[in-house]
Amino acid sequence: MGSAVSLRIPPAAGVHPVGCADVLVGGGKEGCFFRLFYPCTSPAAPAAHPPWCPRPEYLAGLLGVRGWEGTAAQYGASFILGNPKIPVTWNGSLLPGTDRKPLVIFSHGLGGFRTLYSFLCMELASRGFLVAAIEHRDGSACAAYHFSEGDASSSLQEIWVPYKRVQPGMKEFYLRNYQIHQRASECVRAVRILEDIDKGRQVCNNMDSDFRLDSLKDRIDFNRVAVMGHSFGGATALLSLVKDNIFKCAVVLDAWMFPLEDTSYQYIQKPILLINTASFQTGESIQKIKRMNSGGADLKYLTVKGCVHQTQTDLAFLTGYLANKIMGPQATMDPLQCLKIHVAFSLDFLHKYLDLASCVPMLEDLKEVIQAQVICGFPIRNDSKL
């Protein structure tokens, strides 16, 4: 597709090769679409790695959200971006065994889609987690689709859900609040679908997939379920804690707190790790986050200096011309080091609150860079009254 690849996603560093498969169940608001990352039996050759951008519509949507419109813009971006791959085994076999795997549900940010956080999902999967990265169909994804629900004799038709912009005269809070409730419901729905699969019930995957869903039977530990998200997805993770008690804790990356109604905070009473960039959060947002303390939540707040909001996505690895156009202000620290910090603290938190064996050597390995780049607490901002 392009002359050179300017987005290169590093392989996961855990002990297990990583597999991934797409799972699409049902249509409309009652369905759910997610990419499942999991530890698998063997790595794939680079030539067999799946594309990072699954369909051209996603690239068009990703650019459209950022103001690049039209076929010419999409073609130009495709030429510059190349055809980046995800270093995973597509539809690979789940690592055999009798043990049950902890589960993480991942929610993308505004204008994202299910593969935008592949590096973080791969890192968790390479260390034994199952990670379901949801593609929300509330109009907050850059593009999303599902299939029509017809009778058995009719063929399924793709229905695309475009990115929903705030229209003139529209109150943004009401749109985003409606969306966040749908998003949190989709997080819960993903767990329910995986529960059915784990129990051996028949679940129809509408994707053309060689991955055997029945290999997940009796392999998911529903006593160890967490929710994780970035930006809009971070706030979605917080609301998901309220929606269903199945979630034991949440890892929240640079949460966009605006869509949450004030009455939600008192009900957020599960352990929460917030990893933020210094430049994204405002004083008002920090005040909202602090309100969760009054709700009884065990809250740990970290700020990573030198990275920006988009550094917490795969776009952190974007180099060259597109990096400035798509990401805007650039991080001042190495993006891989930045994401390693996120992985290390996330693993440490998940091991603690999901009651897993606590062995996260990454924190010790990154000790020097953590001391230099991580603030334990809230950033000091000029616009803050704190």
Image (tube, rainbow, N blue to C red):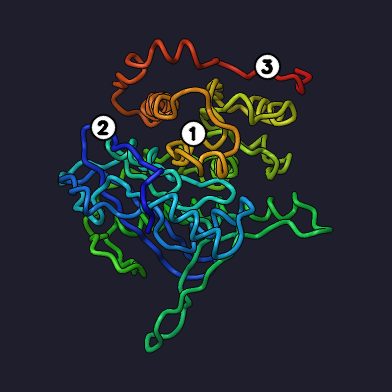
Mark 2: few/some/many CA within 10 Å (<14, 14-19, 20+):
some
Q: What is the three-letter code of the residue carrying label 1?
A: Val
Label ID, residue 251: 1
Q: Dot 1: what SS?
A: strand
Determine which residue is flagged by label 2.
14
Looking at the picture, how far across and down is residue 83, in whole percent? Answer: 36, 53
Q: What is the three-letter code of the residue carrying label 2?
A: Gly
Number of numbered labels in the structure image: 3
Pick whichever of labels 3 and 2 is earlier in the sequence.
2
Q: Dot 2: what SS?
A: loop
Residue 212 picture quarter: bottom left
Label 1, label 2: how far apart the Cα atoms are: 19 Å
Looking at the picture, how far across and down is residue 195, in whole percent? Answer: 36, 54
Identify whether 212 is placed above or below 229: below
Label 3, label 2: how far apart the Cα atoms are: 35 Å
Identify whether 7 is placed above or below 73: above
Query: Looking at the rendering, in which quadrant would you find the N terminus?
Result: bottom left
Looking at the picture, how far across and down is residue 226, in whole percent? Answer: 43, 39
Q: Dot 3: what SS?
A: loop
Query: In the rendered image, is residue 182 in sight?
Result: no
- Determine the residue positioned at 28% across, 41% down: 101
Q: What is the three-letter code of the residue carrying label 3?
A: Ile
Q: Are marks 3 and 2 in contact (CB under 8 Å)?
A: no
Label ID, residue 383: none
Pick whichever of labels 3 and 1 is earlier in the sequence.
1
Q: Nearer the viewer, residue 211 or 182?
A: 211
Residue extending farthest to the bottom is 153
Identify whether 332 is placed above or below 133: above
Disc 1 or disc 2, which is closer to the eye?
2
Left or right: 171 as drawn, with respect to 229: right
- Determine the residue positioned at 52% across, 30% down: 272
Pick whichever of labels 1 and 2 is earlier in the sequence.
2
